Image: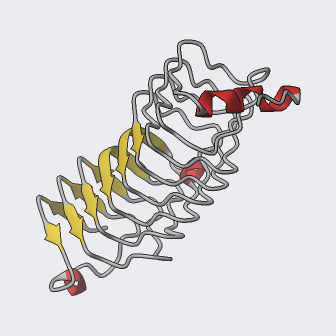
Amino acid sequence: MSYFEEEVFNSENISELSSLKGGEFICCEFNDLDLSGLDASGAKFIECKFNNSNLSNLNLLGATLRDVSFGDCKCVGINFSECNNLFDLRFKRASLDYTSFVDCSLNSSSFIESSFKEADFSQGTFENCDFSNSNLLGANFSKANMKGSNFSHAINFYIDITNTNLKKCKFTMPEALNLLGPFGIEIE
């Protein structure tokens, strides 16, 4: 098992990192890297930052992510549901298309200016999260608890308000009209 603290990984020194699997990364930065498809199962990422990196299809089975930020990252197809522990994640301008957060609990996390095409948040708890300015085309929120979350200026969402807790959520017009979709109501 590898242990790294306060390391900055980039294209020049990534060869020092033989594997992500089972590694422990404390206060590390990952900049401008292609980590797509790698095995990070069992790894621990604590207070880490990923910037302008491709993490698509990263295997996070049994991984821990705590206080981790993703800026301008491609995270397509990641199954965050397979993580052991997820706490305080922050995504900004990230592509999270086809990701799974099924049954996850990520209260007070931020998903700002990001894309979540066909992402699955079903049966999860996402209280007081920030989805502002995000594209939620085809995202599934079935039976999720979104209480107090911010959807200001989010677009393309379709949320069935009959089976999703949206109490105290914030929406902006005209996108808020999408909440009427499950009822077949047409507004001109």
106 and 83: which is toward the camera: 106
Residue at x-position 54% and y-position 51%:
80
Determine whether, in the image, residue 118 is placed left or right of residue 65. Answer: right
Residue 181 locus on image (x, y percent): 79, 32
Question: In this picture, is 162 found above or below 130?
Answer: above
Question: In this picture, is 109 found above or below 101?
Answer: above
Looking at this rendering, what residue extends furthest in the top direction?
168
Determine whether, in the image, residue 67 is placed left or right of residue 42. Answer: left
Determine whether, in the image, residue 89 is placed left or right of residue 171. Answer: left
Question: In this picture, is 133 found above or below 79?
Answer: above
Residue 116 locus on image (x, y percent): 56, 52
95 and 16: which is toward the camera: 95
Determine whether, in the image, residue 111 is placed left or right of residue 53. Answer: right
Question: In this picture, is 23 found above or below 132?
Answer: below
Residue 21 locus on image (x, y percent): 41, 69
Residue at x-position 78% and y-position 28%:
187
Looking at this rendering, what residue extends furthest in the right direction?
184
Residue at x-position 64% and y-position 37%:
103
